[in-house]
Amino acid sequence: MNLNQTPSGERIHIGFFGMRNAGKSSLVNAVTGQELSVVSEFKGTTTDPVKKAMELLPLGPVLIIDTPGLDDEGELGELRVKKAREVLKSIDIAVLAVDSAKGISPLDKDLISDFEKAEIPYIIAYNKCDINRIKTEKENEISLSALKGENINELKEKLASLTPKKELKYIVADLIEPKDIVVLVVPIDESAPKGRIILPQQQTLREILDVGAVAVVCQDDELPHTLKALAKKPKLVITDSQVFGKVSKMLPKDFPLTSFSILFARYKGDLEELVRGAASLKDLKNGDKVLISEGCTHHRQCNDIGSVKMPGWIKNFSSADIEITLTSGTEFPNDLSPYKVIVHCGGCMLNEAQMRSRINAAKQSGIPIVNYGVAIAHMNGILERSVELFPDLKKLLGNT
């Protein structure tokens, strides 16, 4: 895959933070080699987080995020600072720009504490060393000049050294072998994007091909014909969650079945926690509030899954008159206490840090969380079948 076409959810997220006029945006421009952020001598030029997906050597594909100043003032300033702090939930590495002449402020210290609490590796970049040079002593500190370009390459090297050594994870590659047949069920309805298939389906298909297995793609209505046309039994059938129940009835019981959403819950979330949360859907009572949260923003069709299908399925399953709150994109409530359960999308447009941040927030608040695929499988009575590929979940399901 061309690195410039790497999905944002698969990129290393690097957030740049600092006080107004610390030279943060100049530093971003120097690191990226582009005029990504507007630079001005006036405070508060950066009013919203600015994002740029790019290839940054020697790291590879990254998403650079420039944030508003931590000391922004006024009502709008508070909102900007709030947005800057929300970026913490999505980053893998942080860079704190500090004006060498002014040194580290109390707000900088607060942010460093937040980095450490969230276990985010960070670098303190003392900018404007051409005006005042600070002697750095710690490995994660560097003195540089964004204006003069001094030590910018050294900063990149430090960023590369801090790149998290993530556990090697797969969507499906560890479940199949070369020459296995994998059937992908991809319904094409009014909510399907015109002329393309959605990202989790693309990524799953690519991983199957990388393994050397054979991918067969069909719509749900064509599944029986597809299975008859195959010379041998497929190793696995993966379906869009929206037709989970329908596909399960079509498929012989001895055919392994799961969904794209469940695979992505394992890939970038916490499948065990999401499976545990499924049981809460049956406990809903009249008046309970349910948060349905999606990681992307898109034009909603008349039969949209988040705003129409999922609320209807949950109400039918629980037999309760519940209240639904729907959020999308970067929106995710800081206060989760009003909600009885959280139902999240597959998270294909979020990176692992964002997805885990939301799951951990739910756990810390004591609120059950489940994703679309797990919820739909549970409501169709096929959750055990859909996760039988993962033996470590059998005991958990026996207790739910």
Image: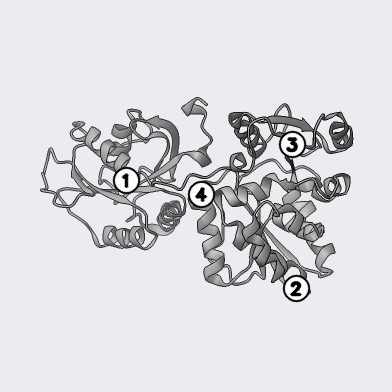
* Colour scheme of the picture: one colour
Image quadrant occupied by the C terminus? bottom right
Give the spatial CA distance, label 4 vs label 1.
17 Å
Callout 1: SS: helix
Whole-percent x, y for residue 327 in the image: 63, 55
Give the spatial CA distance, label 3 vs label 2.
33 Å
Give the spatial CA distance, label 4 vs label 2.
29 Å
Instruction: Report the front residue among 46 and 252.
Output: 252
Q: Which of marks 4 and 2 is nearer the N terminus?
A: 2
Q: Which amino acid does label 1 sit on?
A: Leu
Whole-percent x, y for residue 126 in the image: 20, 46
Q: Earlier in the sequence, mark 2 or mark 1?
A: 1
Which residue carries the number 2 mark? 283
Callout 3: SS: strand
Which residue carries the number 1 mark? 162
Which residue carries the number 4 mark? 352
Q: Which amino acid does label 3 sit on?
A: Leu
Please state if 288 lies on the left or on the right of 53 as rendered. right
